[in-house]
Amino acid sequence: VNVSLHAVAVTDLAWSSQPPSSVAEADATSAFDAAVTPRQQLDLEGAVAGIFAWAYFGDGTSRAVSPAELEVSTTSAGIELTAGSASAPWQLEVASGATAACGNLLYAEWKVCGSLVADSSALVFLDMPKAGALLVTSNRARVTVPGDPLVNPPVNMPTFFDVTVRVSFENGQVVTFTNDDRVVY
């Protein structure tokens, strides 16, 4: 049996041909076109995509492959995978510290009863932006050291402050890193 597999990682869908917003009752049997285009936008740590696969047969037919019948692996340290099940697709998550990469970073195998039926690589574009600026702010304008007389009334100056660390990326996104393990205080 001639069969091939096509796997994709999808973050969302966009209308390529949007249906009418409403159909008059008299036109309820009228035909209209509607189509969506899958998109992949992986430009932030923690971004998630579903992994889907279709089998194409030599007779021209095709069918979706159950996530439970797929085995997916990656060649990128910037990708973390979560196995699918009969009711949920495999998921790709952009890992902490991921760097930009583009290519066939996923490999999917369709197995039935443990036997390989078909396999496919899948294109993934980790479009990780460069950091533009480090933004460090505190919740207090002034503090003093413990034991300073200014900590007492009537001044009551605080001896501590909270710091917020954010990174502004070149694509305009701003991400908070205050509790990130990579930030050293």
Image (cartoon, rainbow, N blue to C red):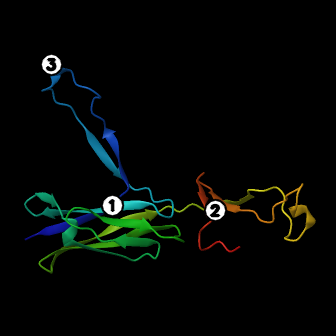
Q: Which mark is residue 131?
A: 2
Using the numbered discs, state the Cα–Cα distance from disc 3 to disc 1 in whole angstroms.
39 Å
Residue placed under numbered mark 1 in the picture: 50
Earlier residue among tags 2 and 1: 1
Left-right relation of 54 to 162: left
**Helix, strand, or loop for circle 3?**
helix
Q: Quadrant of residue 54?
A: bottom left
Please tell me how crowded label 1 is: few (under 14), some (14-19), or many (20+) other residues with Cα within 10 Å: some
The kind of residue on which mark 2 rests is: Ala
On screen, 116 above or below 90?
Answer: below
Q: Quadrant of residue 122?
A: bottom left
Residue placed under numbered mark 3 in the picture: 26
Question: Residue 149 location in percent, x, y?
Answer: 92, 65
On screen, 75 above or below 161?
Answer: below
Earlier residue among tags 3 and 2: 3
The kind of residue on which mark 1 rests is: Gly
**Helix, strand, or loop for circle 2?**
strand
The residue positioned 88% from the left and 57% from the top of the image is 153
Please tell me how crowded label 3 is: few (under 14), some (14-19), or many (20+) other residues with Cα within 10 Å: few
Of residues 145 and 139, which is closer to you in this image?
A: 145
The kind of residue on which mark 3 rests is: Ala
Using the numbered discs, state the Cα–Cα distance from disc 2 to disc 1 in whole angstroms.
26 Å
